[in-house]
Image (spheres, rainbow, N blue to C red):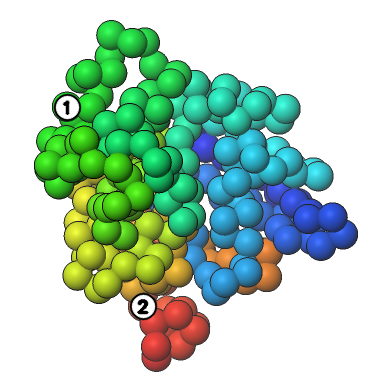
Amino acid sequence: MALLKVDTIHVYYGSIHAVKGVSFEVNEGEVVTLIGANGAGKSTVLNTISGLLHPRSGSIEFEGKDLKGVPPHKIVEHGLAQCPEGRRIFLQMTVEDNLEMGAFTQPGSTIAGGIADVYKRFPRLEERRRQVAGTLSGGEQQMLAMGRALMSRPKLLMLDEPSMGLAPILVEQIFDIIRELHKAGTTILLVEQNAQAALSVADRAYVLETGTVSLSGTGAELMASDKVREAYLGG
């Protein structure tokens, strides 16, 4: 059974039909990526899975449970965490306070261990633990956003544009971290405009164009596709 099953969802912003019948699945232990141009509906799909938006029709199931009408904080409790586009960390709070906020669904007894795990994965954050998050570099803020999401001990981690605005060397670092998380058994749903990087880590991938899935396959198959190469990989 799929860990996450998205079935024919239609999502609107007012009268604008942003997502038009998108369906896909994420199995346990996979990295699945959604690629596509700006405005293709990728972030809208993630925000709908997280409960921040509501589909007009279609269904979303997580571990076989229908998420219709489940509030976002309860979806996090079910084991589904999103690292949002633009990072959205608490800029006036310290690194450690941000991480503690990520554990709001967890028993207090587990927080210290969770923070220690994040620091092991992101040693830079431990060096900055008392620093106000707004003074971190862009790459450090992205690490913090990912660490905060991991504090909820998710069964599925959703990453929305983790490479956005980062220098190429930092993009490499972030994707190395995604590979490490995958190797450690984390199931990941990745939305990313950097198609080359996204397909290089993906078990399976879906191409979104104007709110619909236009192509799907393994990461390697889509990397080799003439259509994908021409549209997203610079020929």
Question: Is residue 234 visible in the rendered structure shown here?
Answer: yes
Q: Is residue 182 above or below residue 203?
A: above
Q: Left or right: where does residue 126 sit relative to residue 168?
A: left
Between 136 and 188, the one lying in front of the other is: 136
Residue at x 31% of width, y 60% of height:
138
Q: Disc 1 residue type?
A: Ala
Residue at x 60% of width, y 46% of height:
47
Q: Left or right: where does residue 116 sit relative to residue 78?
A: left
Q: Quadrant of residue 94?
A: top left
Where residue 231 sits in the image (x, y, percent)?
Answer: 49, 84
Where residue 21 sits in the image (x, y, percent)?
Answer: 72, 55
Q: How many discs mark residues in the rendered view?
A: 2
Residue density around tag 1, few if under 14, some if 14–19, many if 20 or more, within 10 Å: few
Between 116 and 235, the one lying in front of the other is: 116
Residue at x 28% of width, y 14% of height:
110
Q: Which mark is residue 21?
A: none
Q: Marks 1 and 2, Cα distance to the nearest angstrom?
A: 40 Å
Pointer 1 or 2: first along the chain: 1
Q: Left or right: where does residue 6 sit relative to residue 76?
A: right
Where residue 202 sits in the image (x, y, percent)?
Answer: 34, 57
| Location of mark 2 (residue) | 224
| Location of mark 1 (residue) | 116
Residue at x 73% of width, y 61% of height:
18
Where residue 114 sits in the image (x, y, percent)?
Answer: 25, 24
Q: Disc 2 residue type?
A: Ala
Q: What is the secondary structure assignment of the residue under circle 2?
A: helix
Q: What is the secondary structure assignment of the residue under circle 1?
A: helix
Q: Quadrant of residue 176?
A: bottom left
Q: Quadrant of the C terminus?
A: bottom left
Residue density around tag 2, few if under 14, some if 14–19, many if 20 or more, within 10 Å: few
C-beta proximity under 8 Å, tags 1 and 2: no
